[in-house]
Amino acid sequence: MANKRKKDWGAYLYLMPTVVILVAFHVLPIFYSLAVSFYEWDLIGQPEYVGVGNYSRLFDDPMFYKSLWNTVYYAAVSVPLSILFSLIIAMLLNNPISAIGVYRTIYFIPVITSINAVAIVWNFIYHPDFGLLNKILAIFSIDPRAWLQDPTWAMPAIIFMSVWKGLGHNVIIFLTGLQNIPRHLYEAARIDGASRWQQFRHITWPLLSPTTFFIFTISTIGSFQVFSQVYMMTPRGGPLKSTMVVVYYLYRKAFEQFEFGYALAAAFVLFMIIFACTLFNKLYLEKKVHYS
Amino acid sequence: MFKFKHPEYVPVHVLLILGSIFMLFPFIWMITTSFKSQDEILTTSKSIVLLPDLARPSFLNGEEETARIERKKEEAKAWEAEQARPQAERNKKIQAPFQWLDNYLFALKAQPFYRFFLNTIFVTITVTTVSLFFASLAAYAFAFFNFPFKNAMFMMMLGTMMLPQQALLIPNYIFLSKLGWVNTYMALIVPWLASAYSVFFLRQFFLQLPKDLFEAATIDGCTRFQFYYKVVLPLSIPSMVTLGIFSFLANWNSFVWPLIVTNDTSLRVIQVGLSYFSSEAGTRWGPLMAASTMTILPLVIGYFIAQKQFVESQATTGMKE
Amino acid sequence: MRTFLIATFICWILVIGLIIQDDAQSARPSDAAAGGDKIEVVFWHAMGGPLGIVMNDLVDRYNKSQNTYFVKSVNMGSYDTLAKKVLASLVANEAPDISQNYETLTKKFIKHSKIVCLDDLIASESEDVKGDIIPVLLENNTFDGKLYSFPFNKSVPVLYYNKTMFAKVGLDPNRGPETLDEMVEYCRKITKYHQETPGADRSVYGYGCSKANVWSFLNRIIQYGGRIVYDGPDGVMKSGFGEPPAVKALNFLQSMLREGIAREGQGFDHQNDFIAGKVGMIESSIVSKVFMEADIKAFDYGIAPLPGQVLGAAEATQPSTAPGVINRGVILSGSNINIFNNGDPKKVAGAWDFVKWFTSTDVGAEWAVRTTYLPVRKSSVDSQIVKKALEEDTNLKAPFVQLDYCHFEPRLSVWFEIRDLMADHLERATIDMGPAELYCNQMAADVDAILKHATR
C-alpha cells in the first residue's frame, strides 16, 4: 500500500525487453529518417542539407496530393467494409455449429497466404480476357471490363481484394472478443424479452468495444500504409495513377528516382497524419470503450 | 445430416458456405494451376477449366524434352562435354511419377527450398515465442501498473507502427552493418523480438480482466510477477494463441526485410525464394503456384492444429465466471 | 498447452540441428579450397531461370580453371531487387565486388567515385581489348571518354512471328515484315482472316504489345528517323518527342489499336498471348526466346529483325539515316557490369580477371549462343561457335543483322524519371485515343522541363 504514492519505476523492468528493441530498431530509425528528411540524398553520394526544402517541395507536389487522396480513399472504404463483414462472419461463427474448425480454417486461408501469391492470383482473376470475374459477370450479362487498367475501377478492385484478404484476421479477433462476453448476459436478456437486435445493441456491441477499438485503430494505421497490393498488382501506380498511394510514391522516390530525403519527408507527413488520427482515436473514441 | 439436429442453424451454414466459396475460389485456381504446364496455363480456354489435362505429356520427360536434351548434348561436345552432361543427366533424373507433379519437382530443383523452409521455421518459431513473451510482460505493465510517462510510452509504442517499413530499411541496414549482423540470422531475428502490435493486442485483453483480483492478490502477498505467471498467463492462453498465430504468419510471410538484410542463399527464407520465379522476361506460373502451394500447406495444417488448441483451452479456462 | 509448448521447443531444436547439418553438407570440396588461399570476389546479378543455369555453369568453370580467385555469384532475382540491394549495401559499405547495372546508376556511381575506371585495368592488358569490342557496346559504356563499365549481358529487340499462322492466312512463313507499312498489312490480313473465316478463333489479332511501352516507342521514333534527347542550341538538352517522327511513332500504334488489328496488354500478356497462339507478331527482347521456347508447342515460330521505315529525303536528317533505304532502329537493353571500388586492389584485379574471361572470344560466344545475349567481342561474332549456331538455328540471325543499327537510351541520371513520365503519357494516349500530337507535345514539354534542371 505504501507503494501507491511512490513512482512505480519497477514497471519498467517489465517493459525493458520490448522497449530496448523497439527503440533500437524502430524508434531510432524514425529519428534518423526525420533527420535525413532535411537533406537531399541519392543514397550513393553524400547527403546535402536543404532544411525544409523537401517539405516545401512536397506541399507543391500534385502527385503527392493525389497519392494522399488515393490513400484516404483506400482507408475510408476498406476499413469500415472489413470491420462490417468480419463482424458479421464472426457472429455467424460464434454459434455452436458443427464443422466450426473447418469454417475457421477456410476463412483464415487468405490471411495465411502471402501477398505475393495472392496478388498474382487476383491479377488473373481481374484479367480482362480470361479472368474469372469477367466470366462470372458474363453470366449476368454484365459487360467485361479491364478492371486493373480502368482508372475508375482499379482502386475499388484493389480494395475488394484487400478486404477479402484481411477478413479472416479480423474475424479471429472479433471471435475472441465475442467469446469473452459472458453467456448469462444473453440468457438474462432473452428472459427479459429482448430482441436479437436489442441484445446486439446493448450487450454485444458495448462489450465488444475494446476489440472493435483495437481493430479500428490497427486497421486505420495499416490501411494508410498500404503498399504490397499496389506494388504487385498495379505497377507504376495504376491507370492514370489512380492507385498511387503514399507509401508507393515514397518507395519510388527513394529507390527509383534516388531522392531519399524527399521520400522520407513524405513518409513523415504520412506519419504525422496517422499519428494525429490515432491520437484522436485514443483520446476521444477510447472514452466510449467499455472495459470491465 | 448434421443440419437436421439443429435446424435453426441452417441459414447460418448457408451463409457460411457462400462465404467459404468466396474465400476459397482463388486458391482452388492456384492449386489446379500448379498441376498444369505453362501452355495450358496461358491458353485461355484451358486456364479456366479447373482440372489439368491429365493426358498431357510431362514437360519434364516428354518427347520434346528428350529431343532438346539430345540437341544440347551435341552442342556440348563442341565445347566441353563434361560441363553440359551433368545438366542433361540432371534433367533426365527428374522422373515424375505423375506428370501433374512436374511443377513441384521443377520448383524444388530450381532452388534449395528445403533450406529456405528450415530457415523460415527456425526464424519464425524463435521470433514468435520470444516476442510473445516480451510483449505479454509489457502489456501486463500497461494494464495493471501506473507508472510515470505511461501514456507517452504507449503512444511511442503505437508510433512505431506508423512509419512505413520502407522508410526504415536503410537506417536499420546501416545499424545492422555496424553491428556486423548483416547476412546473419541475428538480423532476421532480433529486430522483431519486440512487437508493438502484440503489446497493444494483449493490453486490450488484460484490461478486461478484473482489477480487484489483482489488488486482492497483491495485498495477500502475491508478487506482481507471480500474479502474472499464475493468473494472467493461464487466463490469456486463447489470446496468446491467436496472437501467436498472427505473429507466426507475419514472420513466415515477411519478404522485404529478409530480402534486404541477407545476401547468401543459405540464409534465404521462403518468400524471397518464391520471388525468384518471376524474372525480367516472364513468370513461370506453374512452378510459382506449386511453390506457393507448398508454402501454404504447412501453415494451413499448423493453423488447423493450433486453433483446435484454442477451442480446447477456451473450454478449460472457465472465463465465463 | 504445456505439451504444445514442449512440442514446439523440440521442433525448434530439431530445425536448428537440420540447419547445421545442411551447412555441413553443402560445404563442397571446391568451397573448402576457396576458404584458404583463394581471393573471394562477390558478384551480384539478376540472371534467373534458364539464364541462371548458364551463368552458374560458367562461374563454376571459371572457378575450376584457375586457383587465384573464387567468384561467389548470387542471384538477386530481378534488376529491381538487385538495384535496391546494391544501393543499400553501398550505404553500409557492404557493396559486392561486381554487379550488373543500368547506365543511369553507373553515372551516379561515377559521380561519387564508387566504381573503378576500367581503362586502368585494361591498360595493363597485352591484347587490344577495346578494339575488339563491338563499337556500339563500347560507346554505351564509355563516359566522357573513359570506360567505366563493361558490356556484359546486352540484348536487342526482335520480332517474333507465328510461322504457322502466317502460312494459314496466306503470308510467306519465312519472311517477317520488313517495313512498318508491311507490318500493318500483315496485321490486317491476320485479323481479317480470323474475323471472316468460319470456325476461326475470332479473338486472334495481328500485333501485341504491352501498355505504356517506352522501349517500343523509342525504337519507333528511331525507325521514323527521329531523335530522343539532343543538345539544344543554348547548351540545354531537349527532347525530340514533339517532332514529327515521334508523332508518327505514337500514331502508328494508336491507329493499329483503333483499327483493332493490334492490342495492348499488361506486363507480359503479349508474350503469353503469343505462346498461346492468339497473336501473330510481337516485338520483344531476343532473350525472351529462352523463356518462351520451352512453352511454344503448337506452332512454328520465326524471329526477324524489327521492321524499319523507308524515309524520304526530307525525313532522313539523323546521322544514321539515308533516304530510300529501310531505316532500322533498335535500342539495346540488358545491363553492363560495374566493378566497385571496395579498397582491395586484389579483389578488383580478380573482378577484372573474371569479367575478362567471361567476355573473352570463346566463352563470350558460348554465353551468347546459350542465352541469346549479344557477344561482347567482334571476335566472338566471327567465331566458329557463333557461326555454327547461326547455321543450325536461323532464328538466331536476327540480332546480328541489327548490330549495325543499335542505339542506346540516353544515359542521364534523370532518365528513370523521364521514362516514367513518358510511360504516363503513352498510357493516356492509348486510353483516351486523342490525336497523337497532343500527347507528344505534352510529353516533350514535361520532359524538357526536367531536362532543363538536369545535370548530365
Image (spheres, rainbow, N blue to C red):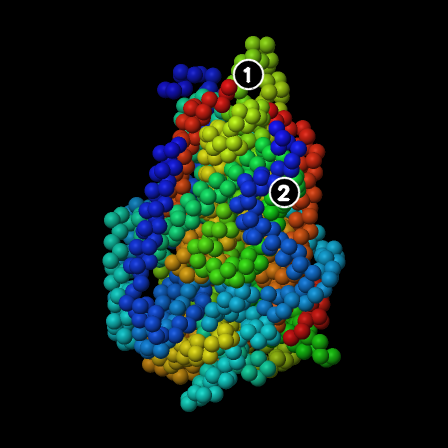
Residue under the point 42% across and 53% down: B269
- Which residue shows up at 69% across the image and 51% down it? A269
**Which chain is indicated by disc 1?**
A
Counting the numbered discs, the total is 2
Residue ranking furthest to the front: A2
Q: Residue furthest bottom?
A: C126
Q: Is residue A95 above or below residue B27?
A: above
- Residue A84 drawn above or below residue C9: above
Residue C91 rendering spot, x and y as whole percentages: 56, 65
Residue bearing mark 2: B153
Residue C181 showing in the rendered view = no
Which residue occupies the foreground of this view, C323 or C50?
C50
Q: Please say if A137 is above or below C236.
A: above
**The numbered mark 2 sits on a residue in which chain?**
B
Q: Residue at x 39, y 74 (%)?
A: C39
Q: Secondary structure at mark 2?
A: helix
Task: Say what amino acid the circle numbered 2 marks.
Answer: Met
The C terminus of chain A - image quarter: top right
Where residue A225 appears, x then y in whole percent?
A: 60, 47
Q: Tell me where residue C152 appears, x and y as whole percent.
A: 45, 74
Position of residue A281 relative to residue C43, above or below, is above
Q: Mark 1 = which residue?
A: A186
Residue drawn where x is 55% and y is 57% of the image = B172
Mark 1, Cα crowd under 10 Å, few <14 / some 14-19 / many 20+, is: some
A245 relative to B42 in the view: left or right: right
Q: Residues within 10 Å of mark 2 (few under 14, many from 20)?
A: some
Asked whether B117 or A198 is in front, the reply is B117
* Rendered image quadrant of residue B310: top left
Asked if the residues shown at circle 2 and circle 1 are in contact, with their CB atoms under 8 angstroms apart, the answer is: no
Picture quarter with the N terminus of chain A: top right
